[in-house]
Amino acid sequence: MKRDMNYSDDFFKSLNVLTGIPVRKIQDYAKENNPCNILEHPMVVEPSDKQLERINKLNEFMSSYSLLKMEEEQTKIKFSSPTDSGKYFVSMLGGMKDKERFLVAFLDNSNSIIETKTVAVGGVAQAVVYPRDILKMAIANDCASILLSHNHPGGSTNPSNEDRNLTQKIVDIFQPLDIKVLDHIIVGGYSFSSMAQNQTLPSFSLKQANYEPIPLKNHEQIFEKNLDYDEEMDEELEP
Amino acid sequence: MNKNLRVKTELDRLIEVMTWLLKLNTDDQEKVQILVKQLGINRFFSEIERHDLSQDVKEKLIDLRNVQTAVGDMNAAPDLKEGGKA
């Protein structure tokens, strides 16, 4: 099938980089034929075994890409329950044991995702969440609500005192702006807990918004601390 | 197959193929995987220049986009026998 198409040098170069077929060979074939045939019928350019393997992989990519693109166009991710939110964040953070990551999903009025961003990543050094950055992203997205989520590399899904304090600080910032914090999902392994579901999500602003960076404590330390948890410690931790 | 499972399987396949084709190291593979999940495949490829990835990886991704776009355009173009302009 011959179609009216002009192929750029970029396309020829890219096809060469990805398949290993020389640019000259692709250009010569394209003089009389559709160069996309090279992907559909690789033998037209008599590829080597290695080039053929790369063409096959490229075809696999195209096929997966098309399917995912089509699925995306048909589906808009929408949250109607903490379970939806939990499953969504488990798909992104599930099983991550190397680093602690803090994600924020920005939602529209119908609780559909506008955008999800990673706002902090913990490594050897302590990760820090910058409320000012989250605020900028929220305003840029013109969102109606947000969902918070982070993973505990140790595998626990129990929110620590630090997690609750961090959530309260975010609520303190967003509630006066009429942006709801719908939930804070904590992912451990492939499980999750939802502060909204457990009724531990702060529902009102306690004090004036504080835009100071919030350290995301290393959960391994917090987890160890929780093992020694007692009444006296609880009192010490209370503000 | 459940739709979510189908998408997840396809996404895993896509990442695996991209890792092989572009020779991604573990760190880049993880970054790409997170970005694709966060942004979706459309935005991931349309905003390559904005991603926190090395220039080398970005260039390889642009190559993939160039080929994908050309094939997509070819599929969308009218067949000459079906009335397309010669």
Image (cartoon, rainbow, N blue to C red):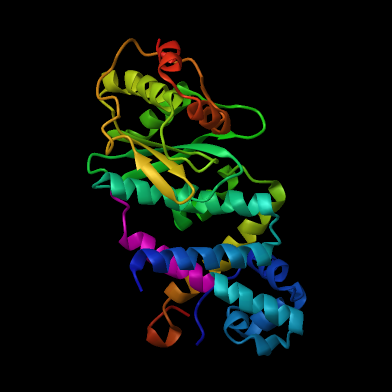
Look at the picture and state if A35 lies above or below B45. below
Say if residue B5 shows up in the picture.
yes
Relative to A94, B18 lies left or right: right
Give the residue displayed 52% in from the left and 51% down from the top.
A95
The image quadrant that residue B21 belongs to is: bottom right
Question: What's drawn in magenta, residue-wise?
Answer: A62-78
Relative to A126, A52 lies left or right: right
The image quadrant that residue A25 belongs to is: bottom right
Say if residue A9 shows up in the picture.
no
Q: Nearer the viewer, residue A63 or A220?
A: A220
Relative to B75, A209 lies left or right: left
Look at the picture and state if A234 lies above or below B11. above
Residue B44: where, in percent of width, then height?
Answer: 51, 52
Residue A226: where, in percent of width, then height?
Answer: 48, 28
Give the residue displayed 27% in from the left and 33% down from the top.
A144
Q: Quadrant of the C terminus of chain A?
A: top left
Residue A152: where, in percent of width, then height?
Answer: 50, 39
Look at the picture and state if A144 lies above or below A202. below
Look at the picture and state if A174 lies above or below A16. above
Relative to A109, A189 lies left or right: right
What main secondary structure does the magenta stretch of the protein show? helix
Residue A24: where, in percent of width, then height?
Answer: 76, 76
Magenta-span inclusion, residue B60: no
Q: Nearer the viewer, residue A90 or A56?
A: A90
